[in-house]
Amino acid sequence: MFRSAALIVPFALVACGAGGGGSSAALPFRIEEVARFERPWAMAFLPDGRALITEKAGHLKLWREGGKPVEVRGAPPVAYEGQGGFGDIAIHPDFAHNHIVYLSWVEPGPGGKGAAVGRATLVEDAGGARLEGLQAIWRQEPKVSGNGHFGHRLAFGPDGMLYISSGERQKFDPAQDMSVNLGKVIRLTDTGMIPSDNPGYDKGRITAQIWTLGHRNPLGLAFDGAGRLWEIEMGPMGGDEVNLIERGNNYGWPRVSNGTHYDGRDVPDHAPGDGFTAPKVWWNPSISPSSLMIYSGSKFPQWRGDAFIGALSGQALIRVHLDGTNASKGDQWAMENRIREVEQGPDGAIWLLEDGEDGRLLKLTPK
């Protein structure tokens, strides 16, 4: 579904600092609703300003501001149930020359379901837009039962490598098991090969993929201007995290967390000397982080270098101030709807996709 629109949307503001207090004030940006999509999940801007947008049920749209979306043929079939379906979209660092795009989705298979990542060439001609040569280059192994915690966010690093977030599929222990790639951050070349400087390169095919371990439901990856990789993930009941991802580190799930299990069982908190890497920022109660963007544009110079997080249950856009390897809570703007995706446009505007049916695409610009 798509509905064009261009209107200014009123929103409330809750500005929360590290202490968690809130106050009402005028929003520091103008919000314009520019389009609507059917259960959108992710977007990626092309060099010419257009955007590719995934819809969870399995559709890929090519959209230009002020125009109608074009259906991109050749998207993979998806297992659309629960948290499963079409996922992330990213473009190759040399997209301007090779037109290669990367997709993630959930697929069925022996034993259940799992996320997959593939690459294809985006072709446009008189017949429309399509993906050609789609090839899966990575899969969650093993496939397991259930419809949650797929993760499958994508990010290219300044090293030219492809980083993939892989959830632990609500199975807990796989996050600490180096023989499976669930509950991990994965690092591959742009063609899906395993880089020789991965920490477990000589320890078997699956272990060789793994960059970090101990993750629960990682739903955002982004690099800062200095090339550091940041990640956000959902904790259990409380304990949502912002992590600085460093080669070979173990982030603790399910052995430690600043949240608790949904059935009330305790999880030990992160503590100095426990052998695990603690989050830089965490929330309790949960905000349900969905996506991560680190701002580098010119429209909001006061926020350059800061992280922006979409919140689902928190129904907010959240800013986290990044200072080198440190992070601290900034603003939390109430958006009155679940925010599935936050992205930066080529001109420095901030874009949001709302979750759910008839999800709005919102453009944020300075007042």
Image: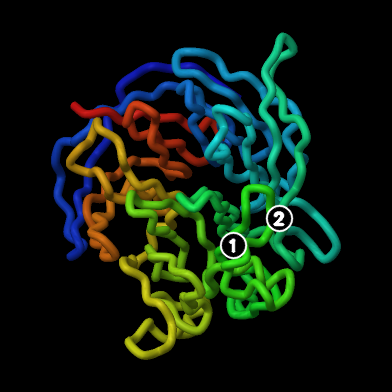
Q: Judge left or right: residue 154 versus residue 287.
A: right
Task: Report the side of 158 relative to 164 (left or right).
Answer: left
Residue at screen point 40% across, 77% down: 277
Percent position of residue 283, x then y? 33, 66
Q: CA distance from mark 2 to mark 1?
A: 9 Å
Q: Residue at x 37, y 82 (%)?
A: 270
**SS class, disc 2:** strand
Which residue was labeled with disc 1? 186
Relative to the observer, which residue lies in front, 53 or 360?
A: 53
Residue 331, which numbered label? none
- Which quarter shows the N terminus? top right
Secondary element under disc 1, as helix, strand or loop, is: strand
Left or right position of 330 against 242: left
Say which residue label 2 marks: 138
Q: Are marks 2 and 1 in contact (CB under 8 Å)?
A: yes
**Residue 192 image point, x, y percent:** 68, 53
**In the rendering, at what x and y percent does residue 236 appear?**
48, 70
Residue sticking out furthest to the right: 110
Q: Residues within 10 Å of mark 1 (few under 14, many from 20)?
A: many
Closer-to-camera residue (106/6): 106
Q: In this rendered view, identify the residue nearer to me: 174 or 164.
A: 164
**Viewer can see residue 259:** yes
Q: Is residue 267 above or below residue 20?
A: below
Q: Is residue 45 above or below residue 311?
A: above
Indicate the position of residue 121 as horizontal and vertical percent values. 69, 31
Residue 168, visible in the rendered structure: no
Residue type highlighted by circle 2: Trp
**Number of marks in the rendered image:** 2
- Earlier sequence position, callout 2 versus callout 1: 2
Inspect the image, locate mark 1, and give the three-letter code of the amino acid beneath it. Answer: Ile
